[in-house]
Each structure stands twice: as C-alpha cells, then as structure tokens.
Amino acid sequence: MTVDEALRLLALLIAAEPAVVGYIKTLLESSQGQTGDQFLAQADSAWARIKANAQAELPPPKA
Amino acid sequence: MKRKQAAQVAAILAFWILVSGFSCQQSSYAKTGKLAKDLAASVLVAQEVEISAYRSGYVTSDQHTVIQQKFFLIAEAGARLDAAINQAQNATTATAEVKTLTALLADLSNNQITGIKDDKTRLAIQAALLTVNTVLDSIAAFGGK
C-alpha cells in the first residue's frame, strides 16, 4: 500500500461521522487492565453497531 | 487539519496493531476477548470506510447494498464467535465461526470489493479488510494453541 493509498483510506475514515471515529478510537485504546468479559462486551457492542449501521444503509424491504 | 487528524488516527491504528500481539500479563480468556474486541473494531473501521466512500460517490448503490449485507452477516457471525468464546469450552463452535468469518471476508474482498471501479477506493477498502484478516488470523492461531 502506498502513502497515497494510506492517506486515501484515512481521509475516508476521517470523513465518517466524528462520533463514530471517537467510538472506534475508544475501542482501539481500551486495551489495558480489562477482563475477558469486558473485552467481549465491547466486541458485542461493536457488532451491534455494525449491524445497526448495515440496517440503516440497506433499502427498506418492499411491501 | 484533516491531515493532522489522519495522522492521529494512523498513529493510534499503528500503535494498536503493534501492541495487540504483545500485551502481556493477561489470561488466555482476556487475550482472546481482546482479540475479539479488536476484530469487531477493525470490521467497524472497514464498514465506516465503505460507507464514507459510498457517500462520496465512489461506490454504486447496488454495490453498497450488497457490501452492507455482507457486513451484517459478518457482524452476526462475530457475535456468535463472542458467545462461543464466552462459553470457554466451546472451541468447536468458535473454530466454526472463525471459518465462517474467514469465508465471508474472502467473499467480500474477492467478489464485492473488486467490483468497485475507483482504484483508490477499492484499494482503501481492501487495506481496511486486510487489517480485519490480520486480527482474525491471530484469533485462529491463538485458538489453535
């Protein structure tokens, strides 16, 4: 991956909702002193968010 | 300003990837849980990159719909993987979900993302998915020990 491509990826990420970027940063930074259950709870929260994002992006089912 | 923000996010991502394999003094359960959390976070990054690319006009509506359907399936498999890890002894289910995730990610990367015509956008999303695959490989390797 070239520097240009890396910057493109980062630009796309930065262009995402600031709240989402903040959430991702929190996920990535929270690595110390936590239990397995706490990590898994964070993972579950992220999966739920991904599902909600996907549902929001998908067209409504046709009647 | 955007370059500064990009540099900050890049630094966090790089630091995270570097330390994720070297964090010590954690139980196997905590390490696996952390990998599961990192996996979900990296998928979320890839999804946000794609959504942003779609909103910027680099991905067609049809491609976007199919890609987001795949992300939904990946999230469902990821949640099942978490449940299997939580049940500790359920290595068989965990291994099966890792295989499911690997197949879904390969399909997404090889079949859906390759259809994006804009070269830079396609490479950017593939790069994000590469991070996902790297974390998933760590889970598979860790689970095999």
Image (spheres, rainbow, N blue to C red):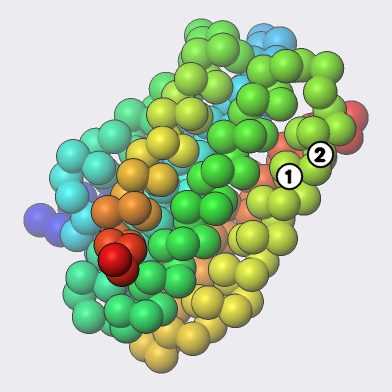
A1 relative to B105, above or below: below
B35 relative to B136, above or below: above
- Residue type, label 2: Thr
Name the quarter where the C terminus of chain B is drawn.
Answer: top right
Q: Residue at x 58, y 71 (%)?
A: B109
Q: Relative to B53, is B79 on the left or the right?
A: right
> Residue B98: which numbered mark, if any?
1
Name the foreground residue: B116 vs B142.
B116
Residue at the outermost front position: A63
The image quadrant of residue B104 is bottom right
- Residue type, label 1: Val
Which residue is under mark 2? B95
Q: Residue at x 45, y 71 (%)?
A: B66
Q: Relative to A49, is B75 on the left or the right?
A: right
The image quadrant of residue B138 is top right
SS at mark 1? helix
Res. A16 visible in picture: yes
Mark 2 belongs to chain:
B
How far apart, in angstroms, are the residues tagged by discs 1 and 2?
Answer: 5 Å
Q: Are marks 1 and 2 in contact (CB under 8 Å)?
A: yes
The image quadrant of residue B85 is top right
Q: How packed is label 2: few (under 14 Cα within 10 Å), some, or many (20 or more)? A: some
A36 relative to A10, above or below: above
> Residue A9: which numbered mark, if any?
none
Residue A50 percent across, percent down from the top left: 40, 45
